[in-house]
Image (cartoon, helix red, strand yellow):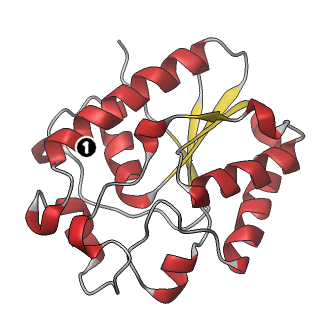
Amino acid sequence: MKILFVRHGKSLANASSTVGTPTTPLAEEGLEQARKTGQDLRGENVSTIVCSSFIRAQQTAELIAAELGIPVYQIIVVDELGERRMGELEGKPKRHENAFFFENDTELGFESQKDLIARLSTALDKIKTIAQATSGTTVVVGHATSGFYFQEIAKGHTQFSEFDPVYQMNNAEFLEVQLTKS
């Protein structure tokens, strides 16, 4: 079972340095990035695409699917993949360093680390079930912060204190999810 995680293409929020909301779409640059990522994934034997319900992730998944010849109606939306809820900061100018969005627990109304870990553990379980039912690679399109948590959970980490140092994927970047044996 091979799972590749893709961060969505550059969104309008990324372009304007604001904190995104579920309805933030891709910027023109993000549309091109997603197409390019789809082209880069052609050699990966992709059979399934899963994405978050946020518009920017769905747009990225649809453009990747088009490049791979996968019908859009076959994309599977997993609500639990959505970006971390950023409370009072959503839709506002970004005034914190990137690490704050990963490391903050509940300040400013953020979704707690514990709740985020539980939600993304559910997402991982769903995606593993989907991936086991296919013969090819499963592509998961998600977000920066929740994507970092998702990948750490896949490694078997169950608490933020166990996570590797915070890193943020670039827009439309993909990498293989390292799954613990279970």
Q: Is residue 81 above or below residue 121?
A: below
On-image quarter of the C terminus: top left
> Is the residue 127 above or below the residue 55 in the image?
above
Say left or right for 75 vs 72: left
Q: Nearer the viewer, residue 174 or 143?
A: 143
Residue for point 85% across, 43% down: 68
The amino acid type found where label 1 is placed reads Leu
Residue 155: % across, % down: 33, 33
Residue, disc 1? 116
Q: Position of residue 169 (x, y in %)?
A: 46, 62
Q: Nearer the viewer, residue 14 or 135?
A: 14
Residue drawn at (37%, 41%), measured in percent from left and top?
Answer: 150
Left or right side of 5 for 32? right
Quadrant in which the N terminus appears: top right
Residue 46 visible (yes or no): no
> Which image quarter: residue 89?
bottom left
Q: Residue furthest right?
A: 69
Q: For the image shown, how many numbered marks are present on the structure? A: 1
Which class describes the residues within 10 Å of circle 1: few (<14), some (14-19), or many (20+)? many
Residue lying at 53% horizontally and 53% vertically, measured from the top left: 54
The front one of 167 and 49 is 49
Residue 119 to residue 97: above or below: above
Residue 160 % position (x, y): 15, 46
Residue 17's place in the image compared with 106, above or below, is below
Q: Secondary structure at mark 1?
A: helix
Residue 34: name its quadrant. bottom right
Across and down, in percent, residue 132 comes to 58, 13
Say whether residue 55 is visible: yes
Residue at 46% from the left image edge and 56% from the top image edge: 143
